[in-house]
Every structure is written in structure tokens, then in C-alpha cells.
């Protein structure tokens, strides 16, 4: 009988040990399951974050592609204003095809030149794009085909600047034969560069109103863009720079005749 009891105790000890081992195994299994679940959740969130980042980059890529495929200089006319007032835009007097967007041809490379090197007949040379060596030139027209006098605004917006090349860029704007050259103010003095008017702001080259544009009138614009070699800020750090601009034509209000 004692032997039987001893065996029974041994058996009970073994059962307890096995029970503990079972509990430990279950605990370890649960712990491993929790870790696996946690790792799977982290992987899932990481995948989502990567997908969001890729989507963001794709969106940025297409935005930049749309912006840059328009070229270095574009002109846009507010279509709603044109519908209200009859203000139209085209690039040739011989072929008055109405446009909402006009695009100047790009120059792959632009070296610095002097304003004195530019041709004297740029305003009368041609309609549309007529770039030359190291400068962009574009001529277009606005016409009031509506029944009433109108006022409109024109501005040149600076879309993008690389390597601060705007420090030496010049924009000459002809309006009906009258030329004005715009430049960023001198970085040291803040004064206008010689022979120029200062940029309207860091964001705009020019912003002006054309008032009293009568029915049947045609305004002729010629825009010329170059890098001025005589500008004191035209230095080596600007090499490789880029600048993109958009000229915007917008109508603020009608001036109705009584």
C-alpha cells in the first residue's frame, strides 16, 4: 500500500508539472500570437504609409509635369471674364484664333547678354514666338469684341525660381509700342536697377490695370525675357538657374456706358 501511495504522489507531481508546462506553452503561444499580430499590424500600417507616400509623389510628379510642360513663359486669359465682356486673346492679327492659353517656345540654354544687344525691332518683328539668341520674345493681342468699354488687369506671376536667377533676369514689356523693363531691385541698396522699374513684389514682376479699353480696340503686347550680364548680381552662383513665369489677364469689372 505505501508503494501504491508513493506512486500516486509521483503521478500527481507529474500531472502538476505537465499542467504547468501546458500553461507555460499556452502562455508562450499566446505571447507569440500577440507578437505576430503586433508585427502584422505594424507591417500593414507601414504598407499603407508607403502607398500614401508613393501616391503623394505621383501627384507631385504630375503637377510638376503639367507646370513644366507649359514652358518657361505662358499667357493665360480668364475665360469667364471673356464670356462676360467679349475680351479675347490671340497671337496673330492675320489669324485671329481665340486662345485661353498661349505658350512661348522654350530656350534650352540662355547665356547672359546686355540689353544693348537686343534687336531694336522686337515689338514689330513678328507675331507669336520670335525668340533670338539668349532671349525669349513673344507677341500677342487682346481685343475688346464686346459692346462696352472694359477695364482689365495684367500681371506676370513668378511661378518658380532656381538658384536665385531672378536676381539678374530682365522682363521687357511692350504695350502698344511703349516699352518698360522690369528687374528685381538691387540686393544691396534696394533701389531699382539702372533703366528698370522694380518688380511689383517677390511674387509678381508687374501688376497693372488697363482702364478704358473701348469696343473694337486692340492692345498689342510683346514680352522679352533675358539674363542681364551687366547686372551686378549676375555672378557664377546663378549658373544653372531657371525661372518660370505666367502672364495672367483678368477682368475685375465692367465699365458700362450710359
Image (tube, helix red, strand yellow):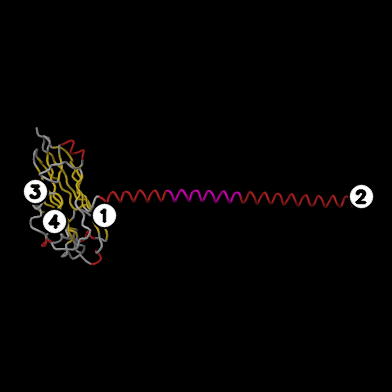
Q: Earlier in the sequence, mark 1 or mark 4?
A: 1
Q: Residue at x 19, y 63 (%)?
A: 111
Mark nearer the N terminus (2 vs 4): 2
- Asked whether the beta carbons under mark 1 and mark 3 sit within 8 Å of each other, the answer is no
Mark nearer the N terminus (3 vs 2) = 2
For the stretch drawn in magenta, the main secondary structure is helix
Residue 48 sits inside the magenta stretch:
yes
Contact (CB < 8 A) between labels 3 and 4? no
Q: Estimate the spatial distance between the alpha carbons at disc 2 and disc 4, rounded to whole Å.
A: 119 Å
- Of callouts 1 and 3, the N-terminal one: 1
Q: Which residue is mark 4?
A: 181
Left/right placement of residue 21 relative to residue 167 reads right
Residue 258: where, in percent of width, then height? 9, 32
- Can you say whether 75 is above or below 170 in the image? above
Q: Which residue is mark 3?
A: 176
| Crowding at mark 4 (Cα within 10 Å: few <14, some 14-19, many 20+) | many
Q: Does label 3 or label 4 sit earlier along the sequence? A: 3
* Residue 160, numbered circle: 1
Alpha-carbon span between mark 1 and mark 2: 100 Å
Measured Cα–Cα span from mark 1 to mark 4: 20 Å
SS under mark 3: loop
Horizontal side of residue 99 vs 25, given as left or right: left
According to the image, label 2 marks what residue? 1
Q: Residue at x 14, y 47 (%)?
A: 140
Amino acid at each position: 500500500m505505501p508503494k501504491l501511495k508513493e506512486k500516486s504522489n509521483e503521478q500527481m507531481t507529474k500531472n502538476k508539472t505537465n499542467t504547468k508546462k501546458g500553461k507555460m506553452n499556452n502562455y508562450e503561444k499566446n505571447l507569440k500570437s500577440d507578437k505576430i499580430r503586433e508585427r502584422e499590424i505594424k507591417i500593414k500600417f507601414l504598407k499603407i504609409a508607403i502607398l500614401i507616400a508613393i501616391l503623394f509623389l505621383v501627384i507631385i510628379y504630375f503637377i510638376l509635369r503639367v507646370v513644366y510642360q507649359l514652358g518657361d513663359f505662358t499667357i493665360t486669359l480668364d475665360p469667364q471674364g471673356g464670356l462676360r465682356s467679349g475680351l479675347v486673346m490671340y497671337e496673330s492679327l492675320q489669324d485671329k484664333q481665340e486662345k485661353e492659353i498661349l505658350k512661348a517656345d522654350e530656350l534650352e540654354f540662355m547665356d547672359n547678354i546686355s540689353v544693348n544687344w537686343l534687336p531694336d525691332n522686337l515689338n514689330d518683328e513678328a507675331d507669336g514666338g520670335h525668340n533670338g539668341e539668349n532671349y525669349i520674345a513673344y507677341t500677342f493681342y487682346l481685343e475688346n469684341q464686346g459692346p462696352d468699354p472694359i477695364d482689365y488687369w495684367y500681371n506676370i506671376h513668378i511661378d518658380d525660381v532656381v538658384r536665385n536667377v531672378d536676381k539678374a533676369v530682365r522682363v521687357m514689356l511692350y504695350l502698344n509700342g511703349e516699352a518698360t523693363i522690369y528687374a528685381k531691385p538691387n540686393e544691396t541698396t534696394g533701389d531699382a536697377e539702372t533703366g528698370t522699374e522694380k518688380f511689383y513684389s517677390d511674387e509678381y514682376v508687374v501688376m497693372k490695370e488697363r482702364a478704358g479699353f473701348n469696343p473694337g480696340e486692340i492692345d498689342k503686347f510683346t514680352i522679352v525675357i533675358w539674363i542681364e550680364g551687366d547686372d551686378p548680381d549676375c555672378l557664377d552662383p546663378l549658373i544653372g538657374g531657371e525661372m518660370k513665369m505666367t502672364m495672367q489677364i483678368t477682368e475685375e469689372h465692367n465699365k458700362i456706358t450710359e
